[in-house]
Image (spheres, rainbow, N blue to C red):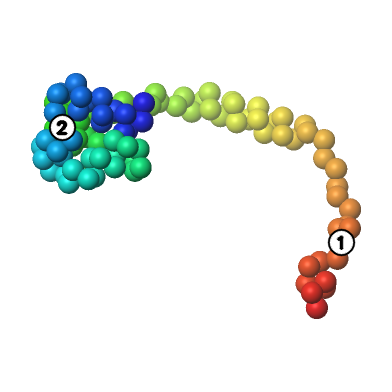
Amino acid sequence: MNGGALITAARQRAGITQAELARRAGLPRSVVNVYERGRRDPGAHALAAILTAAGFELRLARAPAVDPDRAARILSQVLDLAEALPTRRRGPLRYPPFASRVA
């Protein structure tokens, strides 16, 4: 769900108008309208203020921690695969450099 759809759903569940939501969030109504229509995406601070004004709480979850040993093994495997790819040296360019064609 994008930011505009989330704001619209929160406002409708709260049973308030865009004007009331904007007043509670301390934003111009035109800004709330632009967000709801999807013409602009709200930043995290604005989204949190709008959802709080509608009676909801925005919680951000952290991504799971990366296991450095597993990441190192995967990177090593990717690099090994890249080195195993066949390589072919390219010959000289078929066309003269651009500078010599315009001079």
Label 2, residues with CA under 10 Å away: few <14, some 14-19, many ≥20: few
Choose between 39 and 87: the one closer to the eye. Answer: 39
- The image position of residue 70, as x and y in percent, is 53, 23
> Callout 1: helix, strand or loop?
loop
- The image position of residue 25, as x and y in percent, is 14, 39
- Most extreme residue toward the bottom, as rendered? 103
The residue where tag 2 is placed is 17
Residue drawn at 44 percent across, 27 percent down? 66
Proximity of marks 1 and 2: CB atoms separated by less than 8 Å: no
- Residue 51 in sight here: yes
- The image position of residue 71, as x and y in percent, is 53, 27
The residue where tag 1 is placed is 95
Choose between 45 and 82: the one closer to the eye. Answer: 45
22 sits to left or right of 5: left
Image quadrant occupied by the C terminus: bottom right
14 sits to left or right of 37: left
Image quadrant occupied by the N terminus: top left
What's the residue type where badge 2 is placed? Answer: Thr
Choose between 22 and 97: the one closer to the eye. Answer: 22
65 relative to 45, above or below? above
> Callout 2: helix, strand or loop?
loop
* Residue 34 location, quadrant: top left
Residue drawn at 35 percent across, 38 percent down? 38
